[in-house]
Amino acid sequence: MRILHTSDWHLGQHFMGYSRQAEHQALIDWLLTQVQTHAVDAVLIAGDIFDTGAPPSYARELYNQLIVRLHEKGVALLLLAGNHDSVSVLDESRDLLSHLGTQVVSSTGDDARHVVTLALKSSDKKPGCIVCALPFIRPRDVQQSQAGQSAQDKQQALQNAIAATYQRVYAAALQKQAELLTSTGQQLPIIATGHLTTVGASSNESVREIYVGALEAFPTKAFPPASYIALGHIHKPQTVGGLEHIRYSGSPIALGFDEAKQTKQVLLVDVDAGGLQAATALPVPVFQPLLALSGSLTQLPALLQEAAAQASGDTTVWVEVTVQEDDYLADMASRVQNMAEGLPLNILRIKRQRGTAAAQLTGDARESLDELSPIEVFERRLAQESLEPPLQSALTERYQQVLHCLNDTSGAAAGDAA
């Protein structure tokens, strides 16, 4: 069986005042071509389908379009919720989508519900593999908080709870495998999914921590012995711990300037009764160029000219500029904007090199709160106070505890809002 593994689409992302709708439309068109060209049997999206729990209408339209077009091609689709996704939003059309060859797994619950059989793209739709289909696992779904636990105890308890969930679902998958072997004579491979950070994974600024103060990273040894483990949440494509069968596909488009230099991809995964046969990367074209530039005001004109060369047709290059050496100038932002005048560039953000100084931003170059994590906002505000280091540390630790409590209830809150 051939599966296309992808994740972290973030449909509906509002990027510093600009929509990614055109990019995601181009991505869907490209993906459908690859599905046809490479004879893909099923597509698996390992979480963060949407960027927010209440996605805009155009994001839902893109979502529905992907489902319908894959159905027309006879390709199965498995959708797993990520930490950005609303359980209620994904569940509202789950039963309807099952009639279009799409299976949606939004939350943890009955272990048997997480055992999904994907069919081959053939006239008889024979089963091709069994999936331990686990989405983002919210702490409140797998454990109860206990009074008096230290941060280390909470981290270990959550890790144990997630590992136990994987083992139970894998046991149910083994049972399903045995049943199908008896009824059909087929020995189907078992794969697993996940939306979390694993030990050894290389992250970047665009990825937000999802187990703040509770779980830094899930150890690879705690995964079940599946033939392939399709992961989401980390935007940078990579294998984990040198293990070829545990992979992050990464996001298919750059979701921040820190990802601009990454080669984005989806993965073609071939599995059979013997396990994983191949995992082949398909590079995704750049539909909207992003570029981060850094230099002095003297160097920037040449750098901006080089950036403009990446524009094509009606597409401008979205640029982040970090000014070095001259960052003390009050009119720094206007100087940079004047340099880019007439070039096919859209300067979305201008920053000072100085780490403690706030960026001088004007117009469309204002920094968006969406670009910062809650802890980054807190740390910037804390840096403005004259406090002793022990007090700063204590306040930071207390704030992380608050974030952890909010994380435990965020799923329910998103569902109510939707």
Image: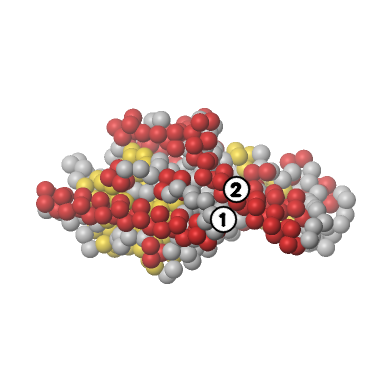
**Mark 2 residue crowding within 10 angstroms, few (<14) / some (14–19) / many (20+):** some
Q: Is residue 289 placed above or below 93 in the rendered structure?
A: below
Task: Decide which of tag 2 and tag 1 comes sooner along the chain.
Answer: 1
Q: Name the residue under label 1.
A: 213
Q: Which amino acid does label 1 sit on?
A: Gly
Q: Of the residues shown, which amino acid type is indicated by label 2?
A: Leu
Q: Name the residue under label 2.
A: 403
Q: Measured from the top left, where is residue 395 in percent x and y?
A: 70, 54
The location of residue 52, given as percent across then percent down, is: 54, 39
Nearest to the observer: residue 184 or residue 324: 184
Q: Is mark 2 in CB contact (under 8 Å) with mark 1?
A: yes
At which x and y percent is residue 302? Answer: 75, 59
Q: Give the colour scheme shown.
A: secondary structure
Within 10 angstroms of label 1, few (less than 14), some, or many (20 or more) residues? some
At 70% across and 50% down in the image, what residue appears? 378
Residue for point 38% across, 31% down: 93
Which mark, residue 33?
none
| Residue in the image at 84% along x and 52% along y | 332
